[in-house]
């Protein structure tokens, strides 16, 4: 049974990593996918993902758009509604890290992380709630992080942005519950992607693994499965929640 047959889903930052895994999982269950990528260097990967998604029998289109810029987010969502008809699901996945100890963290690094990771969630959510409120249904899924819950030395800006997502998620869930629009967050732990592959190397990798009760890193597909749950009616009575997908790291 396909859980998202003919639903319209937006996924930001989907050309690689978690975003790609999420887009593929939603498409496997019948959702049509509109997704974003930012850099020209990701254009080839974005085109390849469109091909993979269409092979699953759904409609798919990529936009080069920066969700951290309000005008770009607004234009993107307007174009999606014009082309696809509505927005049923929005996965705010776009994210970067600029890891540095606070003494070395520059104002520019701080601002860039906040814009891409946190402001993008505000920008996109503000746009997608209009078609969702009109339809009296919708699911917004914000990608936080275990680091936003526990903190991590050298990741002050990243942790702050991801903690901010949690506060925003809970507040907007309270605002939109009466409109049947659900807002939840996922807090991934250490997930194998091209952004985190270096964490597996050497003694440091073993140290990371030793802290995870399940004894392994997670996969993008496992984040996709949790996103699928929150996007579908399986979670119809779930809103304002943060689901940690971390192998027990947050226990």
Image: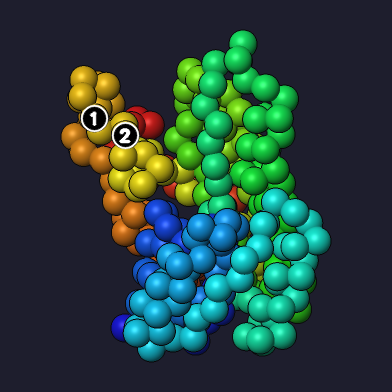
Q: Residue at x 71, y 71 (%)?
A: 77
* Rendered image quadrant of residue 67: bottom right
**Mark 2, secondary structure of its residue:** helix
Q: How many marks?
A: 2
Tell me if residue 16 comes above or below residue 146 in the rendering: below
Q: Find residue 118 and name its label.
A: none
Residue under circle 1? Answer: 201
Tell me what residue is drawn at x 34 percent, y 54 percent: 220
How are the colours assigned in the image? rainbow
- Is 13 left or right of 67, judged from the image as shown? left
Instruction: Decide: is 50 above or below 202.
Output: below
Tag on residue 198? Answer: 2
Number of residues whose C-alpha sits closer than 10 Å to that of mark 1, classed few (under 14), some (14–19) or many (20 or more) = few
Label 1 vs label 2: CA separation? Answer: 6 Å
| Left or right side of 78 for 231 | left
Of helix, strand and loop, which one carries label 1? loop
Across and down, in percent, residue 87 comes to: 64, 76
**Which residue does the image show at 31% across and 45% down from the upper left?**
192
Toward the viewer: 114 or 222? 114
> Is 210 above or below relative to 123?
above
Check contact, mark 1 vs mark 2: CB within 8 A: yes
* Farthest residue, direction top: 103
Q: Quadrant of residue 222?
A: bottom left
| Residue 198 percent coordinates (x, y) | 31, 34
**Few, some or many residues within 10 Å of mark 2 (<14, 14–19, 20+):** few
Say which quadrant the N terminus sits in: bottom left
User: Does the rendering let one see residue 26?
Assistant: no
For the question of whether residue 81 can be seen, the reply is yes
Q: Position of residue 196 (x, y in %)?
A: 36, 39
Q: Tell me what residue is drawn at x 35 percent, y 83 percent.
A: 56
In the image, residue 70 lies at what x, y percent? 78, 56
Q: Quadrant of the C terminus?
A: top left
């Amino acid at each position: 049974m396909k859980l998202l047959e003919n639903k319209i889903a937006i996924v930001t930052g989907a050309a690689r990593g978690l975003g790609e895994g999420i887009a593929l999982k939603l498409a496997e269950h019948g959702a049509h996918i509109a997704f974003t990528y930012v850099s020209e260097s990701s254009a080839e990967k974005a085109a390849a993902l469109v091909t993979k998604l269409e092979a699953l029998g759904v409609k798919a289109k990529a936009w080069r758009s920066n969700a951290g810029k309000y005008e770009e987010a607004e234009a993107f969502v307007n174009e999606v509604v014009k082309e696809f008809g509505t927005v049923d699901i929005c996965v705010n996945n776009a994210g970067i890290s600029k890891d540095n100890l606070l003494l070395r963290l520059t104002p520019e690094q701080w601002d860039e992380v906040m814009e891409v990771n946190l402001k993008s969630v505000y920008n996109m959510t503000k746009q997608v709630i209009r078609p969702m409120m009109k339809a009296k249904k919708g699911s917004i899924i914000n990608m936080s992080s275990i680091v936003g819950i526990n903190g991590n030395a050298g990741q002050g800006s990243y942790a702050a942005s991801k903690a901010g997502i949690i506060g925003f998620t809970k507040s907007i869930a309270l605002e939109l519950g009466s409109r049947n629009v659900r807002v939840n967050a996922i807090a991934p732990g250490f997930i194998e992607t091209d952004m985190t592959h270096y964490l597996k190397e050497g003694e440091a990798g073993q140290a990371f693994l030793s802290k995870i009760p399940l004894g392994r890193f997670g996969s993008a597909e496992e984040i996709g499965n949790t996103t699928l749950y929150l996007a579908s009616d399986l979670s119809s009575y779930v809103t304002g929640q943060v689901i940690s997908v971390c192998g027990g790291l947050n226990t």
